[in-house]
Image (spheres, rainbow, N blue to C red):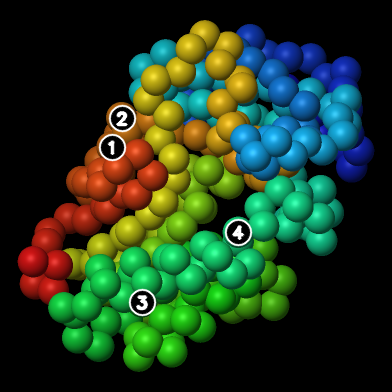
Amino acid sequence: MESYANGKWNSRAPVVRILTCKVCNEPAPLYGVTDFNKSCEERRGRYLPLTGVPVYYHRCDSCGLIFTSAFDHWSKGDYLQHIYNDDYVLVDPDYIDTRPAGNAVLILDFIKKGHALRCLDYGGGNGKLTSLLREGGVDGHSWDPMDEGGASPSGSFDFISAFEVLEHTPEPLATIQRALGLLNGRGVLLLSTLTIDHVSPRGMDNWYIAPRNGHITLYTRRSLQTMFAGFGYRVHHFNDNLHMALKDDPSWLS
């Protein structure tokens, strides 16, 4: 199933009723459908005009992952044209300043016992968070897959943040593997993504299921644990939105 194919939108693409879960490979029946322009801002009463382009989501019977395959074959150019364009600020106004500022405070407190930690903001967007961390004396680096000019990160890192990243990837296992591959042996990955553990049948009204924001893969705690366990990592959930993955506790985390 695709809602976008061959360089153009296709609202008449056939719908596959059952797909394979992108995390645990178990059956994932069709869960629901929404318009492409459904955004997170709807929870604040702000609605974009409907496009008439349906985006179908599936939900795994086993781990609970909710995902769409509608964007699986998109190129970077497709994402930049249709999602991460100049209008993205309308569906996520907090990404410019508010979220980076709050996350910088969180990270500076989180790593305050560390010394000369090499830190990477994975999926760092406009780089604002990394700039704030550097102002706080952190050896900070930033990388984002949608940055057309940014070089891929090199070397290993003691700490990696991935705020509001995992819900944007059509390939969760590949994304996690790449991020974890940049951690050193006792490194820590701190990530934010809203886990949706309790959903009703055809519960597509959940505000976090938002294709216009690029929210195309939504997790439960179980799906996160399953995914990271496959790479030898355990997950600690601070709350429904903030999570930590690691193998061994570094000394600075105690």
Q: Earlier in the sequence, mark 3 or mark 1?
A: 3
* Mark 2 residue type: Arg
Tell me if I can see residue 181 in this picture.
no
Distance CA(mark 4)–CA(mark 2)? 28 Å
C-alpha distance separating marks 2 and 3: 27 Å
Nearer to us: label 4 or label 1: 4
CA–CA distance in space, label 4 to label 1:
28 Å
Q: Which residue is mark 2?
A: 222
Report the side of 196 relative to 249 (left or right).
right
Which dot, 4 or 3, sits closer to the camera? 4
Q: Earlier in the sequence, mark 2 or mark 3?
A: 3
Q: Residue at x 51, y 19 (%)?
A: 59
Instruction: Residue under label 4, please give it.
Output: 94
Q: Which residue is mark 1?
A: 225
Q: In terms of depth relative to the viewer, which is nearer, 20 or 32?
A: 32
Image check: 161 left or right of 212?
Answer: left
Residue designated by label 3: 119
| The N terminus, quarter of image | top right
Q: Is residue 228 left or right of residue 61?
A: left
Q: What residue is rendered at 47% in x and 81% in y? A: 132
Q: Residue at x 38, y 54 (%)?
A: 191
Side of 86 where 157 appears, left or right: left
Q: How far, Cα to Cα, is label 1 from label 2?
A: 5 Å
Tell me the amino acid under the disc marked 4: Asp
Contact between marks 1 and 2 (CB within 8 A): the answer is: yes
Question: The disc labelled 1 sits on which kind of residue?
Answer: Gln
- Give percent across and percent down for residue 63: 36, 23
In space, the residues marked 3 and 1 are separated at their CA atoms by: 23 Å
Identified by mark 3, the residue type is Cys
- The disc placed on residue 132 is none
Q: Alpha-carbon neighbours of circle 1 within 10 Å: few (<14), some, or many (≥20)? A: some
Q: Quadrant of residue 7?
A: top right
